[in-house]
Image (cartoon, coloured by chain):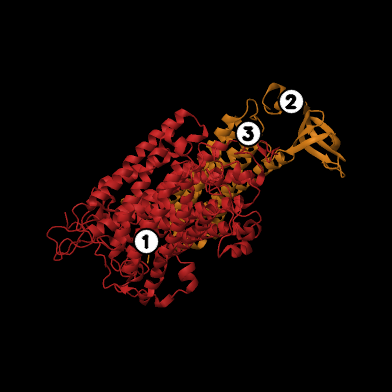
Chain colours: A orange, B red
């Protein structure tokens, strides 16, 4: 038994099965990310005045990542075009670039995650707020026993609101320096993980889900790149279709980032 | 449209030959048990897998309901017979064999979840859709057979996760099948996390299924099977698949967010200043409980149409077949179902009138809700009118289909007061709404599903189910279904709230005699009646279960591949259909319901029967 239109287009619909399938899948992905972006909008609109963070993310790194994905979109297209003209060597080259670009993206993303993970907001006993990146903590540091010290590189502010808008002139001109904080002075401390506030929560969720998509797409492309040779020998048209379908997914994932970047980094 | 017929290359001839034996042509690689029944990629096997699993889950969901009904009628009294067993399995929550309030909440949440996501949807959409849709459109299989298999496996795994959650410390999810935050996050059990992970698996499963169905219906229609020649069942499944494809992902998004709330302690759905157990919760706050409700009901309401549209499709097929005349208003049915599918995406907030989301929004959703009743009524009216002037064959599938019409009618009409904000304010969260949606789903959808089981059983097995016991099953189910759900309207109108583990005893006139809105003794008494009706309803299903299994081996054998003398392609296959389905590639030349065509020798003309037996069919012969 053969299923028709797995490789060739059906005449009246003008499409082969897998291409239709991936477009339908992408439609559902639009709804998935659409739901999450709606959540972002509602949370942001509903935030208390002055409490939605601005400028917490590094625009330079975000820009580099945007360029990496844009480049990978081009190499993906070129890899498919190489298959179309039956040039397997070129295909190998272009999709190797795609995979490397994707890995570079994930590397930068991990660095950004790490940067948030070691970034602490510390509520001090005197009512002030210390905020900065962990430099070191003493060996005997224990919050419960109130022993030891915690060193951060950052600043100390009077009001938590001052930490929210890092694009403001005050925040830009603030001097960052090392502060050694004794455990006894700490009322509460928390890193910039997902639970810190709704911004970090939606930031980690959105970019995390996107990163999972990048990872999944990379795995598929790597599989086709590394083990596609036999199918290429047997049925190059079918292989080319697979490259096209995985490429469509990859373009979608890139497109999601094009929305994520301004929404999270620039506003 | 006709011209497209000649553009098709001929189907690659399946290696099957005509005959009832589906083993003959596979001698060279007879698949073993595992590849034949567990890792099968054949749409018919997957359909049966879905059907069997879903029926088991429905049985289990029913069982949970019986325990809850006992608790409602006899709050705190140990469950007779199985109480000790419950205590042994579940431990403290069932101490002394009685159902604790926490356990009652678990049962309530899981009854809803299991019935909707593990019972009715898999049976209506996945089981019947998988088995019947490729046959009806003349396809050899689904477009993506392996994705189809993955879909079933994801579904099964999701079901396992749901069941396992009963046995973790704290028990299964307790926040209702709607899992409203912040309740869902603050209840001290990981059952909610299991629920969410289970839901993500189920959503994945239905996503894979939906993609497969849509692609199959678009791509694998047999030559000549134009859109307006599709049986109504296929249209219903097509629209259902689109609803699943587009409405489920936002719930998946919501599920991911709630999972973050539960496991990573974020505050997506938790408001600022949330207090739990009298203490300020250690949460950043800033989230929105309403957001969950919006995302949930964005799926939740289209889900209602996922439950009902395949059922309508089944009923349409059974009615056309047994009235021996074309469906009345086929095109109206098709356009109505498309319109319902579209509108179902913009009615969701009628579940949220009481949340204080605002009058203007309520007005908008009230309007769309009233509008969506129009195509639903058109569909039901077309089915009623189809009966007019037919010489109706009464058999078990037809009885269930006929039973569906008034039962779904009751369910639909009692929904109108709930769709209007003013009356919903009073009826919201009472037993009235329980009665309303159970009328839609239980004697509505589930009756249609029974009709489908009795109707397609001969195609699946080559034997008919027993007619006498089928009728016993129908009449008893009809009577007891109504005895279970009709009293709930009265209870709800009197103000009895749902989700109360004590069956509202605390609000009864016996307990609080001076309260003006206390529930009178008659309302409380109904709890007893409903319990006994539910038990009787359970007993009424025994003939069905026995009939189903007994008939596989001992039912009356069918003498033709088309025992109901139907027109659609699913009956023009060998029985049971072999791998690849059709003995000859079907060429469709006419619409789906050519019954009693004047001048034809029989009172049915199959969709692929050649125009005139003398002239061999060429693609243009019928122009």
Query: Is residue B546 in view?
Result: yes
Which residue shows up at 19% across the image and 62% down it? B610
Residue B15 position, x and y percent, is: 34, 71
Give the Cα distance between marks 3 and 1: 53 Å
Residue neighbourhood size for the residue with mark 3, other residues' Cα within 10 Å, grouped as few (<14), some (14–19), many (≥20): many
Instruction: Decide if residue A80 is on the left or right side of residue B162.
Output: left
Name the residue beneath numbered marker 2.
Answer: A159
Q: Which chain's residue wears label 2? A: A
Q: To which chain does the residue with label 3 belong?
A: B
Residue B476, label in figure: 1
- The answer to whether tags 2 and 3 share a subunit is no
Quick one: B258 or B5, which is closer to the camera?
A: B258
Q: CA distance from mark 2 to mark 3?
A: 18 Å
Numbered disc 1: secondary structure: helix
- Residue that carries the numbered disc 3 in the rendered image: B286
The circle drawn on residue A193 is: none
The first of marks 3 and 1 along the sequence is 3
Q: In the rendered view, tell whether residue B246 sits above or below residue B79.
A: above
Mark nearer the viewer, 3 or 1? 1
């Amino acid at each position: 038994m053969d299923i028709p239109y797995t490789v060739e287009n059906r005449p009246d619909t003008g499409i082969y099965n897998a291409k239709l399938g991936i477009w339908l899948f992408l439609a559902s992905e639009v709804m998935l990310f659409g739901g999450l972006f709606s959540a972002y909008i509602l949370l942001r609109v509903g935030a208390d005045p002055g409490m939605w963070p601005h400028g917490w993310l590094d625009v330079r790194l975000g820009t580099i990542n945007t360029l990496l994905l844009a480049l990978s979109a081009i190499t993906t297209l070129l890899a498919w075009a190489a298959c179309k003209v039956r040039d397997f060597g070129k295909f190998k080259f272009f999709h190797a670039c795609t995979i490397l670009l994707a890995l570079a993206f994930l590397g930068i993303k991990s660095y950004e995650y790490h940067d948030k993970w070691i970034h602490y907001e510390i509520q001090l006993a005197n009512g002030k707020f210390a905020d900065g990146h962990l430099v070191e903590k003493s060996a005997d540091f224990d919050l419960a026993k109130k022993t030891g010290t915690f060193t951060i590189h950052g600043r100390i502010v009077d009001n938590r609101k001052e930490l929210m808008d890092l694009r403001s002139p005050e925040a830009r001109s603030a001097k960052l320096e090392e502060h050694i904080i004794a455990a006894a002075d700490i009322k509460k401390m928390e890193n910039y993980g997902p639970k810190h506030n709704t911004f970090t929560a939606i930031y980690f969720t959105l970019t995390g889900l996107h990163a999972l998509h990048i990872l999944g797409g990379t795995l598929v492309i790597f599989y086709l790149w590394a083990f596609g040779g036999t199918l290429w020998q047997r049925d190059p048209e079918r292989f080319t279709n697979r490259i096209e379908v995985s490429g469509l997914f990859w373009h979608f994932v890139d497109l999601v980032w094009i929305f994520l970047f301004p929404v999270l980094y620039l506003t | 449209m006709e011209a497209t017929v000649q553009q098709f290359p001929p189907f690659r001839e399946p290696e099957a030959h005509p005959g009832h034996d589906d083993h003959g042509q596979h001698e060279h690689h007879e698949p073993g048990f595992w590849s034949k029944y567990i890792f099968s990629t054949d749409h018919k096997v997957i359909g049966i897998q879905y059907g069997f699993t879903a029926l088991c889950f429905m049985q289990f969901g029913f069982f949970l309901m019986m325990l809850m009904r006992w608790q409602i009628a006899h709050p705190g009294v140990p469950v007779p017979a199985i109480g000790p067993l419950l205590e042994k399995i579940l431990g403290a929550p069932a101490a002394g064999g009685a159902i604790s309030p926490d356990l009652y909440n678990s049962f309530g949440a899981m009854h809803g979840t299991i019935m909707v996501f593990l019972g009715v949807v898999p049976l209506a959409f996945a089981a019947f859709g998988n088995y019947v849709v490729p046959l009806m459109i003349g396809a050899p299989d689904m477009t993506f057979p392996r994705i189809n298999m993955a879909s079933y496996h994801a579904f099964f795994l999701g079901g396992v996760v749901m069941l396992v959650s009963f046995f973790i410390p704290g028990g299964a999810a307790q926040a209702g099948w709607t899992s409203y935050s912040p309740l869902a996050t603050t209840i001290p059990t990981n059952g909610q996390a299991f629920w969410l992970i289970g839901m993500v698996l189920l959503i994945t499963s239905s996503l894979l299924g939906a993609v497969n169905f849509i692609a199959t219906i678009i791509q694998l229609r047999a030559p000549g099977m134009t859109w307006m020649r599709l049986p109504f069942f296929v249209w219903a499944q097509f629209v259902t698949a689109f609803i699943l494809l587009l409405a489920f992902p936002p719930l998946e998004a919501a599920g991911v967010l709630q999972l973050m709330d539960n496991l990573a302690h974020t505050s997506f759905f938790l408001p600022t200043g949330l207090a739990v157990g009298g203490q300020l919760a250690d949460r950043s706050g800033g989230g929105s409980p309403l957001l969950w409700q919006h995302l949930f009901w964005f799926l939740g309401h289209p889900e209602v149409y996922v439950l009902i549209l395949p059922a309508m499709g089944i009923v349409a097929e059974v009615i056309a077949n047994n009235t021996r005349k074309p469906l009345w208003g086929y095109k109206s049915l098709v356009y109505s179902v498309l319109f319902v599918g579209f509108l179902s995406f913009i009615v969701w907030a009628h579940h949220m009138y009481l949340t204080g989301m605002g009058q203007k929004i309520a007005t908008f959703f009230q309007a769309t809700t009233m509008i969506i009743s129009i195509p639903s009524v058109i569909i039901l009216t077309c089915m009623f009118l189809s009966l007019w002037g037919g010489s109706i064959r009464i058999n078990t599938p037809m009885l269930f289909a006929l039973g569906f019409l008034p039962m779904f009618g009751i369910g639909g009409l009692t929904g109108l007061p709930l769709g209007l904000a003013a009356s919903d304010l009073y009826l919201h969260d009472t037993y009235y709404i329980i009665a309303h949606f159970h009328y839609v789903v239980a004697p509505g959808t589930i009756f249609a599903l029974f009709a489908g089981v009795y109707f397609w059983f001969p195609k699946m097995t080559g034997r008919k189910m027993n007619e006498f016991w089928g009728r016993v099953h129908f009449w008893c189910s009809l009577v007891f279904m109504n005895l279970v759900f009709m009293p709930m309207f009265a209870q709800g109108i009197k103000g009895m709230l749902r989700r109360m583990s004590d069956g509202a005893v605390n609000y009864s006139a016996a307990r609080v005699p001076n309260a003006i809105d206390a529930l009178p003794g008659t309302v409380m008494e109904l709890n007893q009646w409903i319990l006994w009706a539910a038990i009787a309803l359970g007993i009424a299903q025994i003939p069905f279960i026995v009939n189903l299994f007994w008939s596989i081996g001992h039912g009356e054998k069918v003498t033709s591949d088309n025992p109901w003398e139907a027109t659609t392609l699913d009956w023009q296959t060998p029985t049971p259909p072999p791998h690849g389905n059709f003995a000859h590639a079907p060429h469709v030349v006419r619409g789906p319901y050519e019954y009693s065509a004047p001048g034809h020798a029989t009172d049915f003309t199959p969709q692929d029967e050649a125009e005139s037996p003398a002239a061999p069919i060429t693609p243009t012969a019928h122009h």
